[in-house]
Image (spheres, rainbow, N blue to C red):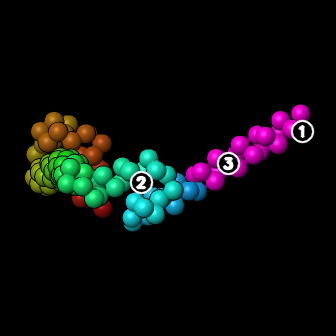
Amino acid sequence: MAKMEMNRQEEYLNRIDRLKLMDDDFHCIKSEDMYSKVLADEVKYLKETEGGRGRMCRILEEMCEEVEKETAERVEKETAERVAKETARSLLALGKLSYEDISQGTGLPLEVVEELAAQKTA
């Protein structure tokens, strides 16, 4: 049983050593400085060949487009919410509509309209 436990410990330490080497590889600038041949070959292809650079450019362009789309959606949502709150504040200031009507007209939850009304009186 002690021998089995030692083998498990050795296997565990070997895994840690491999992880440390892989971490070192991720921080290498040049592929020839890497320990892992598989990783070094892929990095060499991506960084040092025309096809690899083209592939990396396409990947980065796709990532930028995705970030741009997500940002536009977030800004659109935030702007719509801000406009809805400004409209609700204006309607509250008029004092002619119920909170329910303002909620329905602006699309804001009733609780938000009530909070805005409480801020107005505070």
Question: Residue at position x 64%, y 53% from top?
Answer: 17
- Three-letter code, disc 3: Asn
| The one of 58 and 33 positioned closer to us in this rendering | 33
Give me the disc on residue 27: none
Q: Secondary structure at mark 3?
A: helix
Closer to the observer: label 2 or label 1? Answer: 2
Which is more foreground, mark 2 or mark 3? Answer: 2
Question: As drawn, is 60 to the left or to the right of 11?
Answer: left
Q: Position of residue 32 (x, y in %)?
A: 42, 61
Q: Earlier in the sequence, mark 1 or mark 3?
A: 1
* Tag 2 residue: 40
Q: Which contiguous range is marked in magenta? A: 1-19
* Mark 2: secondary structure: helix
Quadrant of the rendered structure where residue 4 is?
top right
Choose the circle earlier in sequence order: 2 or 3. 3
Contact between marks 2 and 1 (CB within 8 A): the answer is: no
Identify residue for label 1. Answer: 2
Q: Quadrant of the N terminus?
A: top right
